[in-house]
Amino acid sequence: MLQINNLSATVADKPILKGLSLTVGAGEIHAIMGPNGAGKSTLAYVLGGRPGYEVTGGSVTFTPLPLAGGVGGGPVSAITAPDLTHPPLTPPASGRGIDLLALAPHERAAAGLFLGFQYPVEIPGVSFVQFLRESLNAQRRARGEAPLSGGEFLKLAREKAALLRLDMDMLKRPVNVGFSGGEKKRAEMVQMGILDPSFAVLDETDSGLDIDALRVVGEGINAVMRRPNKGVLLITHYQRLLDYVKPDFVHVLADGRIVKTGGAELALQLEEHGYEAVA
Amino acid sequence: MAVAALQPTRKDEAFRYADLAALAPLWPVAVETIAVPAGEHRALSIVPTGSVGTVRELAISLGEGASFDLRVLSAGAGYCRISVRAELADRANFTLGAAQLGSGAQTLEVVSEVTHLGRDATSRQIVRSVAGGGANVNYLGKVKVARGADGTDGSQSVRAMLLDRQSSANAKPELEIFADDVKCAHGCAVGELDAAALFYMASRGLPSETAKRLMLQAFVAEALVGAADEDELLAAALAALEAML
């Protein structure tokens, strides 16, 4: 679903990613762990297309699978109905993958990529409701789908806010302004629920969360993204989130490369013995 | 009030950043005097349209407890200069909310002089300017507090957003205070749209014009909220922003 091949990137001319390769298949959740400064957030930003993060080599091929009701979800009922029993899986014909790095950031989103921020940005004066409705409808228009009406959007937003136990009134406030660290992260997950991406890159979504919020966010990731036709790259420092979101693979990122790959048990070993001993 | 006969020059402080060439055919400008009797309220919204430019001079005097709500949405073509002098008696209240949206080779400016003559009067000035394509947006504003005008509460909040490096903004908030018990706040900032916010919005699927429009809409709205014709002003501002981006 997401194939990263020998990816190199620099930030302010400093090499950060140095030939990183990683493949995430449909239905898989991959966790990326690693010491500070290894390049974890850089990987997330490069995948999202942040200006200033320059790709100097390699490729990223993104092959989204159709979701119920079209990429990114169709009508509200189709988004909320669990499709685990009848996943509309249609394996892509060869060569159907998208050259992710050739797309502008908003085009990557429309293609089905979601980037969860470690530090969600405050946007004064712009309400979450307005922001997300414009975002979702921009994505839908880019995919040739009809935009949602105000009523349809609010119904969807209410549903996803309830799922993440975020007070709907908070979505009427300006984007992230005055939100606590935990509320910002929960709001990130509500956004993910509303936008219903094929693939999510979550950059330290667990940082700044208390134990209860961590569980709610973990359950949210499972509810929105644990599908046979979706994929997740979960960047984290700690094993604890992985108690709630069980990864299929765990990778250790150090000095710009994946240096070790294992199953869920690798995270436990890292927690116990540290990066230096294990990787 | 008599009409000023001689065209001002750069030596006149209030015309320091003016587009004198554009001003020439519009000069002299008749001063519009407005007197609000004690206890009464008036409001005026100025939304210049047309292509030849707009230059207006207002002189407003507020009686005891009177109030005036002046809004400016300057988004028309050509030079626009709105100049206002306001004099406040006891407990009078004056609001100036101005949004200036400049694009291309255009100068837009708001010049104000608010004089607190009486006690316990309040004045609020909020100016939000956006400049793109080499436009020039200005605010020159003076708050004067006369001797004995205690209990004065005055504020000036001035912010300008530059969409490119060719555009410019001048902000000059001034205070002249001759009373003791006075609260006067002023702040001004000139900046660019937050790149981190633009990327955040793009990552949710918003094309950059839409992201910029949303941010600028919120920015400009700060000068227009609370107006009697707020909805019309906001709709006009939005249309102007869409044309600009």
Image (cartoon, coloured by chain):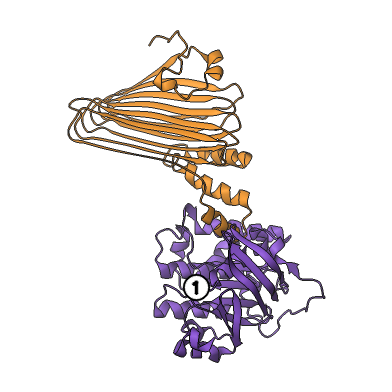
Eyeballing the image, is B185 above or below A238? Answer: above
Q: Is residue B129 above or below residue A160?
A: above
In the rendered image, residue B133, in percent from the top left (x then y), is placed at 60, 36
The answer to whether residue A159 of the structure is visible from this angle is: no
Q: Is residue B219 left or right of residue A223?
A: left
Res B3 quadrant in image: top left
Closer to the camera in the image, B66 or B18? B18
User: Can you name the residue that lies furthest to the front here?
Assistant: A14
Question: With A72 as the anchor, is B9 left or right in this view?
Answer: left
**For the residue carrying disc 1, how many other residues have a C-alpha within 10 Å: few (<14), some (14-19), or many (20+)?**
many
| Numbered circles on residues, count | 1
Q: Which chain is purple?
A: A
User: Does residue B98 appear in this view?
Assistant: yes
Q: Amino acid at mark 1?
A: Thr
Q: Residue at x 49, y 88 (%)?
A: A277
Image quadrant for the C terminus of chain A?
A: bottom right
Residue A264 relative to residue A182: left or right: right
Residue drawn at x 61%, y 24% is B51
Question: Residue at position x 48%, y 78% from top?
Answer: A237
Examine the rendered structure and indicate whether residue A80 appears above or below residue B199. below
Give whichever of B108, B13 is nearer the camera: B13
Question: Which of the chains bears the disc numbered 1?
Answer: A
Looking at the picture, how far across and down is residue B81, in whole percent?
49, 24
Residue A91, horizontal then vertical, whole percent: 78, 79
Query: According to the image, label 1 marks what residue?
Result: A205
Picture coordinates of residue A66, whole percent (x, y): 73, 73
Chain B: its colour in the image is orange
At x 59%, y 72%, the residue is A201
Hey, which quadrant is residue A13 in on the image?
Answer: bottom right
Name the secondary structure under disc 1.
loop
Q: For this rendering, which residue is in front, B206 or A43?
A: A43
